[in-house]
Structures are given as structure tokens and as C-alpha cells.
Amino acid sequence: MLYYVQKMKLLFFLLILISFNTQSQITWVKDNYYKKGNFFIYWGWNRAAYTLSDIHFKGNDYNFTLHDVIAKDRQSPFEARLYLNPANMTIPQYNFRIGYFIGDHYQLSLGADHMKYVMQNDQTVKIDGSISNSGTAYDGNYVNDDIVLAKDFLLFEHTDGLNYENIELRRFDVLFGRKQFQFAINEGFGLGVLVPRTNTTLLNNKRYDEFHLAGYGFSTVLAANLTFFKYFFIQSEWRGGFIHMPDIRTTMSKADRASQAFWFSQYNVVFGCNFRINKKTD
């Protein structure tokens, strides 16, 4: 995971450097492929990293907080049957986006970022609060005590997944190009909602296994775009942001809830196409 975090940071600083150093030196090609009225669509995959998080669990017989919990993503190993088969394409961590150029430099888009958030079991964290009537060895009152997050105590995963449904506004600048390709950068910000399908087993309670509107998030994005033959592109993106989920469903009991907040970093590689429905030029 450290490798991917370092890679995200490197891309972030490189894109910032490119952006600041070229803003006054942008060379527009004669036939810019991206204009007001164009649409684009893309699909790709991501790796993600998360900061430590305090997770609060509340139910009829418990009310406790776990502090500084470590979690990681879970990207599927590359297999053609997963990544190239339309029936299985939503299993890996993916990114989907469709957008419209509201101006020659600005695009507005809707997207779905399907990440996976997996709490690391067997880590030792601090716990505050109380547990009662669970019929387990975990009943008791806790004040800044150590607890091992064993699987018989807690399994906590947004693995189907940590779904960030968002709207973004980006600025798009072509830096240089030739007849068959163009290189551009784009940057912007977005906001959206989190609709996770959370896999949680807590104190042997039966899990709740449905999509649920759990909270909100906001993010910034920097991207480098290489367009081939006018219509097709590959894009490398870094996205970073904040997620707050105050209403996570955990078990079949409607009284059982969890809440958490954390920062995330995401590195994406996406493939897409740029097209125009109305052929009339401005």
C-alpha cells in the first residue's frame, strides 16, 4: 500500500508543477478536439488509501468507539474474466464518468468511484464505551483500553463497496498536440454522496447486506490526458478528498448504526472517448 501512496503523491506534485509552469505557456493546437458541446465517457480502475479513522458503533446493548483504526483497499488481481468481461467489470475497484463540455475549457460530469474499504483485523486499538448482553467475552465498560480487533468481535468492510457517487467541475487545458494526438491536463473539484454496501459482523449479529445512503464526501482531482486519433483517450488521475458517513447500517437491527470520517487518496487509470452529438460547430 505504501508503494501506491507514494505513487499518488508523486503524480500529485508532478501535475501541480506542470500546471503552474505551463499556465502562461499553453500552446493551443489549431484543431482542438475538446470544445463546448462535446461529451466524454470513461471507465477505469483505481487504487485507494485511507487515513486512520475513529469508528463509533451504537446499538441497543452497546455504545463504543474504536480509535485510529487502520484500513486498506482491496483491488482484485488482474484477470481477463474480471476486467474485460462486461458481466464482471463491477467487481474490481472501478471508476465510471460521463460528462459534457459546458465551455471550451470547462467540463461538468457525473461519476461513480467504486472503492473498497477493509478494516485490518487483528490490529490493536483503543476503545471507549460499553458492551452488554452480547453473550461474549467482550461485555464490559472500557475507558481508553486496548482491544484486539479479532474477527469474532468485528468484521468491518465497505467492499461492495465504498461507493462515492459525485458531480465534478473541471478545467481542461490542452498543452500541445499534433494531428493524431493531444496532451492535456485537467483539474477540478467535486462533491457527492456515499452509498456503501457494508459487510459487518459485530458480536455475532447478522449483517445488513444492502446499499444504504450513509453520508457525503468532497474531493479534488488532477489528471493528465493523452488523446489519440481525435476520439480516444487514456487518462491518469489523482483524486483526494474527505468522507463523512454518520449513518452506516451494520446489522439487521435498525437500531444498530456506525459512523466514521476519514481522508482518502485515489490513483486512477481510465480509458474513454470524446464525441459530439450535434455536429454543428460554434
Image (cartoon, grey):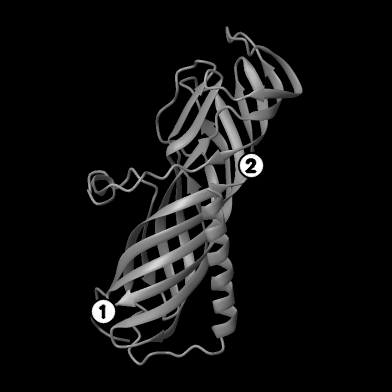
Q: Which mark is residue 52?
A: 2
Residue at 25% over, 49% down: 80
Question: Identity of the amino acid at label 2?
Answer: Leu
| Residue positioned most to the front | 3
Q: Nearer the viewer, residue 34 or 81?
A: 81
| Element carrying mark 1 | loop
272 in relation to 226, above or below:
above
Task: Say above or below: 208 vs 223.
Answer: above
Q: Quadrant of the C terminus?
A: bottom left
Residue at horizontal 67 percent and vertical 23 percent from the top: 147
Neighbour tally class for label 2: few under 14, some 14-19, many 20 plus, Cα within 10 Å: some
Residue 149 can be seen, yes or no: yes
Left or right: 67, with 96 as reference point: right
Q: Position of residue 16 (x, y in %)?
A: 58, 73
Q: Earlier in the sequence, mark 2 or mark 1?
A: 2
What is the total number of numbered labels drawn onto the structure image? 2
Which disc number belongs to residue 129?
none
Instruction: Give the residue type that dot 1 points to.
Output: Phe
- SS at circle 2: loop
Q: Residue 90: x percent and y percent?
A: 32, 46
| Residue 58 location (% of width, % of height) | 61, 24
Q: CA distance from mark 2 to mark 1?
A: 44 Å
Q: Is residue 66 left or right of residue 154?
A: right
Q: Residue 219: in sight, yes or no?
A: no
- Residue drawn where x is 41% and y is 36% of the image: 211
Q: Quadrant of residue 124?
A: top right
